[in-house]
Image (cartoon, rainbow, N blue to C red):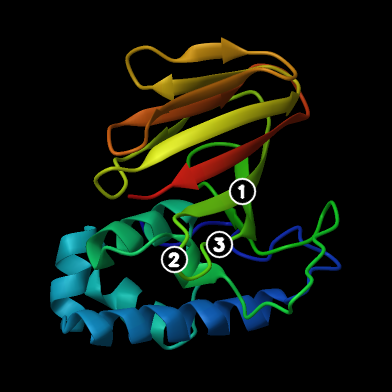
Amino acid sequence: MSGSNSGPGAGASGSDVSGTELIGLISASIRRERERAGLSMAELARRAGIAKSTLSQLESGVGNPSVETLWALGVALDVPFSRLVDPPRPVVRVVRAGEGPVTHSERADYAATLLASCPPNARRDIYRIEAEPGETRASDPHMPGTVEHVLLGTGRALAGPTGAPVELGPGDYVSYPGDAPHVFRALAPGTLAVIVMEHV
């Protein structure tokens, strides 16, 4: 699950961090969390199901990781996805439409922009999702106890457990276990949603 044609920072013109800065941030974050967990590069790669060469490139600041690769690394490290991609924040932070650290799916037309990660003593991350009809974004289970909350803004989408997703229209909300396989599939062009990841 290494690499993708468009990765973090792609399409994020005007972002508060450039694509190059975001890759550097991800590189440092992966190395920091791997060392904190006391894992060798080979062991982390094995747990995440990625090639050791891919992990080596990411830690060296080379490559363009997909959202799937970063999720796999987060699960293997037992940390929220946001800890790998969130830049340092000022006290007041505004994220305009089209800004923020973006990661793309390698299997679907799906982009997740991290809007806010868990501050100390909180257990949630917030993402803006932009998706187009086509391939379903299938997610592997996240950390145990994770719950996802989805609020659809525009368009239509299927979201929820892999075997029983719910069709959502503008303004609709659904929550479901994020620690089991789940999906998000846009059914209309220009589908936008907000996802809150709640961690135990």
Q: Residue at x 64, y 29 (%)?
A: 151
Quote the CA–CA distance across marks 3 and 2.
11 Å
Residue 151 drawn above or below residue 90:
above
Label annotation for residue 121: 2
Left or right relative to 165: residue 195: right
Residue 187 drawn above or below residue 183:
above
The disc labelled 1 sits on which kind of residue?
Answer: Tyr
Q: Residue at x 30, y 31 (%)?
A: 181
Quote the CA–CA distance across marks 3 and 1.
9 Å
Q: Are marks 3 and 1 in contact (CB under 8 Å)?
A: no
Left or right relative to 2: residue 17: right
Label annotation for residue 127: 1
The residue lying toward the viewer, choosing from 105 and 181, is: 181
Question: In terms of image quadrants, where is residue 49?
Answer: bottom left
Label 1 packing within 10 angstroms: few (<14), some (14-19), many (20+): many
Question: Which one is earlier in the sequence, the residue at label 3 or at label 1?
Answer: 3
Residue 153 drawn above or below residue 14:
above
Rendering coords of residue 113 (x, y %):
65, 53
The residue wearing badge 3 is 117
Q: Residue at x 32, y 46 (%)?
A: 142
- Residue most extreme to the front: 121
Q: Of discs 3 and 2, which sits in the foreground? A: 2
Label 2 packing within 10 angstroms: few (<14), some (14-19), many (20+): few
Quote the CA–CA distance across marks 2 and 1.
19 Å
Question: In terms of image quadrants, where is residue 81?
Answer: bottom left
Left or right relative to 132: residue 50: left
The disc labelled 3 sits on which kind of residue?
Answer: Ser
Q: Of discs 3 and 1, which sits in the foreground? A: 3
Instruction: Kindly tell me whether residue 67 is visible in this rendering.
Output: yes
The disc labelled 2 sits on which kind of residue?
Answer: Asn
Question: Which one is earlier in the sequence, the residue at label 2 or at label 1?
Answer: 2
